[in-house]
Image (spheres, rainbow, N blue to C red):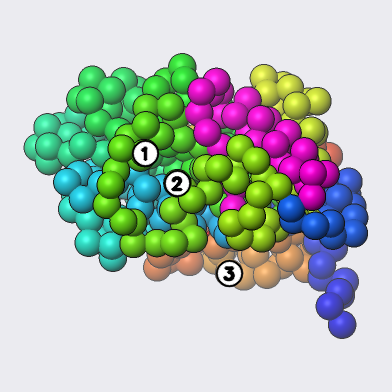
Amino acid sequence: MIFDSDDDKLLLIPGPTPVRRDILDALAIPTIAHTSMRLADIMSTALKHLKTVAGTKDGRAFVIAGSGTLAQEASLLNFVAPEDTLLVASNGFFASRLAEIASQHGMKVVVRTAEPGTSITPDGLDQALHESGATVVTFTHVETATGVMAPLAEFMRVIRRNGALSIVDGVAGFGGTPEPMDELGIDVLLTGAQKALGVPPGLAIIIAGHAAWERRLARTDALPTYYADLARWAPIMERPEKYFSTHPVNMIRALGRALEIIMTEGLDARYRRHRRLAENFRGGLTEMGFEPFTDSDHLAPTLSAVRTPRGVTSSRFRERLASNGVVSAGGLGDPDDRVVRFGHMGNIADGDIATALEAISRSLN
Ligand SMILES: Cc1ncc(COP(=O)(O)O)c(C=O)c1O
């Protein structure tokens, strides 16, 4: 059996997020040729919409089969040159993974790490840039491990003042909170399909700004990757009917449908909805005795990390919550077993938040 009753639970982990029926239906349309003009049209429209979500006119969008980690790795490989020093401003697990990937590829890496549940400050970033002489900076905009949203605009001001290139991991933010590339001067923005875009997992998405792309094209060294070399993909993203590697045809359809939904909702309305749902959800959790794990200046609108009420372990609570129909996530590196993480991003509605709060209340009693 590939389906059982557990599959119907409300998926409130910080990604993958619940996938709307019409997006699932898009996946079920018969597979067409990866080189067909029909798929090329769908893909070109999706790439255009991705650029709209990313707020860039001259940027280039790339969509390849993979996941967020591939988007991280491809971004580092394509935009950190051998002569660069990379500064990782880490607010937690997923930023530290960026450092791990860079180290594995032999890049010169400097890491600054925030206290759990807080963010590196813009001043701290400035100082780290001066001390390290870094030429490229990377960080998670929203850190899924802690629910921390970094101060993106302030970070970008510091990075631009220092003349460094920026690689922003937008995996847990993109489509749920603004990440306007041209306005803020973000050079490279990366994400996956399964978070605030509301698509099933399986796509690595990268948007490179104009200057970053020029820099990539100017490189003459051979990248230590074949599949993730974006210079090989660039002509394909312009003419998706050309072949480099087979497009994940059905996933591209699902992405196309998800982006239509986003365009119809409108970005401002979508970001407002995410803020409203986050506030309502966190208000309900506080009333039930949950304590914030994330410091109040850095709360993300896309997910919440909280500590359970006293005397309740995260694992026991989450087990009961699952039996009441809602799936949540535990902490990453949580020795006390008290952290619970909830995603509230993508295409979820007020009714889902109400359902979740009611199930949480039942699970505590
Ligand atoms: C901020 C962030 N970056 C990167 C990743 C890695 O993405 P994936 O699990 O799709 O490889 C995740 C996954 O949750 C994430 O939250």
Q: What residue type is labelled 3?
A: Ser
Q: Is residue 2 left or right of residue 292?
A: right
Question: Mark 1 and mark 3 in contact (Cβ < 8 Å)?
Answer: no
- From the viewer's perspective, tell me whether residue 32 is left or right of residue 193: right
Q: What secondary structure characterizes most of the magenta part?
A: helix
* Disc number for residue 104: none
Q: Residue 217 carries which label?
A: 1
- Residue at 42% x, 20% y is 184
Marks 1 and 2, the one that precedes in the sequence:
1
**Residue nearest the observer in this picture, 296 or 47:** 47
Residue 231 badge: 2
Distance from disc 3 to disc 1, alpha carbons, whole Å, reads 49 Å
Q: What residue type is labelled 2?
A: Ala
Q: Is mark 1 on a helix, strand or loop?
A: helix
Which image quadrant: the C terminus?
bottom right
Indicate the amino acid at tag 1: Leu
| Label 3 secondary element | helix
Residue 226 percent coordinates (x, y)? 44, 62
Dividing the picture into quarters, in which one does residue 315 lie? bottom right
Cβ of disc 1 within 8 Å of ligand 1?
Answer: no
Q: Nearer the viewer, residue 208 or 298?
A: 208
Identity of the residue drawn at 25% across and 31% down: 164
The answer to which of marks 2 and 3 sits earlier in the sequence is 2
Task: Say which of marks 3 and 1 sits in front.
Answer: 1
Q: Is residue 177 magenta?
A: no
Spot occupied by residue 45 in the image (x, y as percentages of width and height): 73, 33
